[in-house]
Image (tube, grey):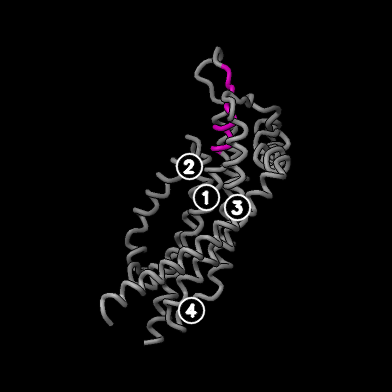
Amino acid sequence: MNSEDNEMSFLDHLEIFRWHLIRAAAAIMFFGVIAFIYKEILFDLILLGPRDPNFLTYKVLCSISQYLGLQDALCLQESPFILMNITMSGQFSTHVMTSIFAGFIIAFPYVFWEFWRFISPALHPEETKLARGVVFFSSLLFMFGILFGYYIIAPLSVNFLGSYQVSSEVANQISLTSFISTVTTVSLANGIIFELPILVYFLTKIGLLTPEFMCIYRKHAMVLTLILSAIITPPDITSQILVSLPLILLYEMSIKISERVIKNQEKKQ
C-alpha cells in the first residue's frame, strides 16, 4: 500500500468520525432544545431544587437528625442565601448553557454509542464480544454519578458555601450563574468520575494497566481520592468522606474488572 492510499484511508476515517460527531452533536442539540423549552422543569424543579428546604436530601437528613435525637440539628428551615441576576444577559445565557448541559446528559447513551460505533470496528470479534454491554454499563455508571452528585454533593456544597459567612455584617447574595454552575459542574464531574471502571477495562485491554499495578499503588490512589474529594466538595470532612467512599469502591471494583480481563486474555492464549 502506498503513502497516498494510507493518506486516503486516514481521511476516510476522519470523514466517518466527523459524521459520528455530527450525529452526536445533533442529539445533544435536540435534547437541549427540549430542555430549553421546558425551562420550568429544568430550573424550578431540578436545578433550583438543592436550594429548597423541602429537597429530598434535606428531608432525609432531617429524619436522620430526629431519629438520632438531635432534634432539628440537620434540618434546613430556609434557604441560607438569596439568588440574584447581576448582568443584562445573565438569565438568558444561563438558560442556553444549562440547556446544552442537560442535552448532553440526556443524550449521553446515544453519544457514547456513536463513539463506540467508531471504535468497535477496530476490535477483534472476541474483543467486541467481551465488550458487549459497554454502552449500557457506561451509561448506567454515568447516570449513577450524576444522581450521586446531584442528591449528595450538590446539596452539601450549596448549603455549606451558601451559608458560610466571614462576618455577620456580610449577607450572602449569590449570582444565578454561580449557583447553576456549582450544581451542574459538581453533578457532571461525578458522572465522569463514575466512568472509572470503564476506563480501567479498556486500559487493561490494551496492556497499559494491570491489577498488580493498581494494588501496588492502592495507597497512592487513596490519597489522590481524598485530594479529588477535597476539590469537588465543600471544605468539610463529612462531604469529603461521602465522596471518597464511592470513589474507593469504584477503585476496588476496577481492580476486579482488571483481573477479569487479564484472566480472559490468559484463557484465550
Q: Are marks 4 and 2 in contact (CB under 8 Å)?
A: no
Q: Which residue is mark 2?
A: 232
Q: Earlier in the sequence, mark 2 or mark 1?
A: 1
Amino acid of disc 4: Thr
In the displayed structure, 177 sits above or below 139; it is: above
Q: Earlier in the sequence, mark 3 or mark 2?
A: 3
Q: Which residues are magenta?
A: 171-182
Q: Name the element at disc 4.
A: helix
Could you tell me which residue is drawn at 55 percent across and 36 percent down?
Answer: 157
Q: Which residue is mark 4?
A: 128
Q: Residues within 10 Å of mark 4 (few under 14, many from 20)?
A: some
For marks 3 and 2, give the CA distance: 28 Å
In the displayed structure, 90 sits above or below 167; it is: below
Q: Residues within 10 Å of mark 2 (few under 14, many from 20)?
A: many
Q: Which residue is mark 3?
A: 29
Amino acid of disc 3: Met
Q: Which label number is shown at residue 190?
A: 1
4 or 3: mark nearer the eye: 3
Amino acid of disc 2: Ile
Could you tell me which residue is drawn at 58 percent across and 35 percent down?
Answer: 93
Q: Name the element at disc 1.
A: helix
Q: Are marks 2 and 1 in contact (CB under 8 Å)?
A: yes
Amino acid of disc 1: Asn
Q: Residues within 10 Å of mark 3 (few under 14, many from 20)?
A: many
